[in-house]
Image (tube, rainbow, N blue to C red):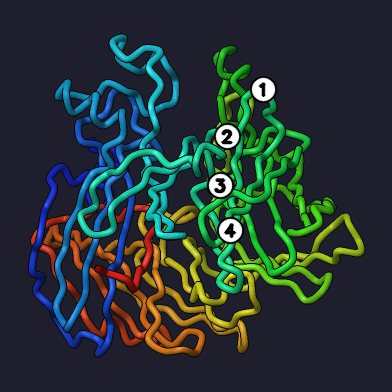
């Protein structure tokens, strides 16, 4: 039986394509010009031992749109690990994270990771990101790998795959989980100015070594969620899970003022929060919208499996009162599982109305793929959904502006069609997702669903 994360919509693409002039179905939106990028794992060789997609070779895909036409290009991120395996003609590094699963020929060799999780464009640099290493710079047009970027040596080691760019100030804020392995409880926090220089750095220490994937940014605050999914090398050396679910620890949220560094702690029920939709504040009233998971699919510390019935993720609003540290208020906004929340990023860290999600399937359901795209309108608390079909797997929706007003634009997502074995880029009206795609840009081959994506207007 094929590994579920190596087949269908997750099957690796082991070929690089260049300059494909795409077949367009429907009507291309007038004036839509730029590049849609998607990144995700696509191991160049069959993996060793058991496969973890979080450690599969990163591949960047680009759909370039201009003058009503579209082309496609994809390239692997040529990390040190990728180059060593390419030279050997086979997989050398295990994807489980355990050193024993790698080939003895690469024992002790330090690499720059797999750069397969997300992309960010800031201060003239286009970066491929993951959790455990520094970003890798990519050429926006050729997708050629230009090498690791450490902010002129000021990044201590690694950075989050989900930095936040403040559209008002141009500042990019990033965190670094396990920045120093000797300080497993601390999280690095860095502010990068509009020119690309790190201008402020600090640390926040939690009460347990939490697996942290994302965080929230408002105009005045930074919120970091410490969920009781813990990482322990000591546990791994004892033959127990390196990553484990410890719900008895509860969820703790550190909220810090961006400028002064004042810090306060809040607490709530145990969960795992993978992705934040957006956050904002009105003076000391702080709102964070995210998709928490009742129970992640990590084992308990003794190896027992979690309850898959609680794995569903739901768009939820958390509210905090800066003047009253302690318990926070949580309110579920939708009743159906959803993930990969995105917004019109011109509203990042600001009050906003429109949110977008991948839905119909995913964790907590019988389907590992999402089959639909949702639009949540916070103003009237309404959710509208486009169902792509029972045999079509959608990826995270990405917003492309089509006007100056929030939400005036388009949603782009790559779709894998199990019937044809091919993929296409679907373009939807962001205000009318239920009508389905207004245009589809067809590939003649399959493309992995991938993780995260980015729309970039500049395409020169």
Q: Residue at x 22, y 25 (%)?
A: 85
Residues at marks 2 and 3, CA–CA distance in whole angstroms: 18 Å
Tell me the SS state at disc 4: loop
Q: Closer to the N terminus: mark 4 or mark 2? A: 2
Crowd rating for badge 2 (residues with CA inside 10 Å; few <14, some 14–19, many 20+): some
Q: Which residue is mark 4?
A: 193
- Residue 64 coordinates in the image, percent (x, y): 21, 69
Q: Which mark is residue 156?
A: 2
Q: Closer to the N terminus: mark 4 or mark 1? A: 1
Q: Closer to the N terminus: mark 1 or mark 3? A: 1
Q: Which residue is mark 3?
A: 213
Q: Closer to the N terminus: mark 4 or mark 3? A: 4
Q: Residue at x 8, y 69 (%)?
A: 21
Residue 75 in the figure: left or right of residue 431: left
Instruction: Tell me if label 1 and label 2 are in contact, CB under 8 Å.
Output: no
Tell me the SS state at disc 2: loop
Q: Which residue is mark 1?
A: 182
Residues at marks 1 and 3, CA–CA distance in whole angstroms: 20 Å
């Amino acid at each position: 039986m094929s590994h579920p994360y190596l087949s269908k919509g997750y099957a690796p693409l082991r070929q690089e394509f260049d300059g494909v002039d795409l077949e367009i179905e429907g009507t291309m939106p007038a004036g839509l010009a730029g590049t849609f990028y998607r990144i995700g794992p696509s191991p160049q060789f069959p993996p060793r031992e058991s496969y973890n997609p979080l450690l599969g070779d990163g591949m960047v895909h680009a759909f370039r749109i201009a003058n009503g036409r579209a082309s496609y290009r994809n390239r692997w991120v040529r990390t040190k690990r990728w180059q060593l395996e390419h030279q050997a003609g086979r997989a050398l590094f295990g994807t489980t994270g355990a050193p024993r699963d790698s080939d003895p020929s690469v024992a002790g060799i330090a690499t720059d990771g797999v750069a397969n999780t997300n992309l960010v464009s800031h201060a003239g640099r286009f970066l491929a990101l993951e959790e455990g290493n520094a970003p890798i710079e990519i050429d926006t047009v050729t997708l050629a790998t230009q090498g690791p970027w450490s902010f002129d040596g000021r990044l201590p080691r690694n950075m989050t795959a989900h930095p936040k760019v403040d559209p008002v100030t141009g500042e990019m804020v990033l965190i670094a989980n396990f920045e120093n392995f000797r300080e497993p409880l601390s999280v690095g926090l860095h502010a990068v100015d509009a020119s690309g220089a790190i201008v402020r750095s600090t640390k926040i220490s939690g009460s347990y070594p939490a697996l942290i994937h994302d965080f929230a940014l408002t105009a005045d605050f930074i919120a970091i969620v410490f969920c009781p999914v813990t990482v322990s090398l000591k546990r791994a050396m004892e033959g127990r899970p390196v990553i484990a679910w410890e719900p008895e620890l509860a969820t703790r949220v550190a909220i810090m003022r961006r400028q002064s560094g004042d810090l306060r702690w809040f607490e709530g029920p145990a969960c795992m929060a993978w992705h934040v939709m957006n956050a904002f504040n009105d003076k000391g009233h702080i709102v964070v919208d995210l998709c928490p998971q009742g129970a992640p699919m990590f084992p308990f510390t003794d190896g027992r499996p979690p309850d898959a019935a609680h794995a569903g993720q739901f768009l939820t609003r958390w509210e905090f009162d800066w003047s009253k540290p302690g318990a926070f208020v949580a309110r579920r906004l939708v009743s159906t599982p959803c993930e990969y929340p995105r917004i019109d990023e011109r509203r990042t860290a600001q009050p906003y109305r429109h949110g977008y999600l991948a839905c119909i399937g995913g964790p907590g359901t019988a389907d590992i793929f999402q089959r639909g795209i949702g639009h949540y309108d916070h103003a009237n608390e309404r959710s509208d959904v486009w169902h792509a079909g029972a045999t079509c797997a959608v990826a995270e929706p990405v917003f492309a502006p089509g006007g100056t007003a929030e939400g005036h634009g388009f949603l782009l997502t790559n779709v894998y069609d199990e019937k044809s074995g091919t993929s296409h880029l679907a373009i939807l009206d962001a205000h009318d997702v239920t009508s389905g795609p207004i245009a589809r840009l067809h590939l003649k081959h399959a493309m992995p669903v991938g993780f995260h994506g980015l729309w970039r207007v500049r395409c020169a």
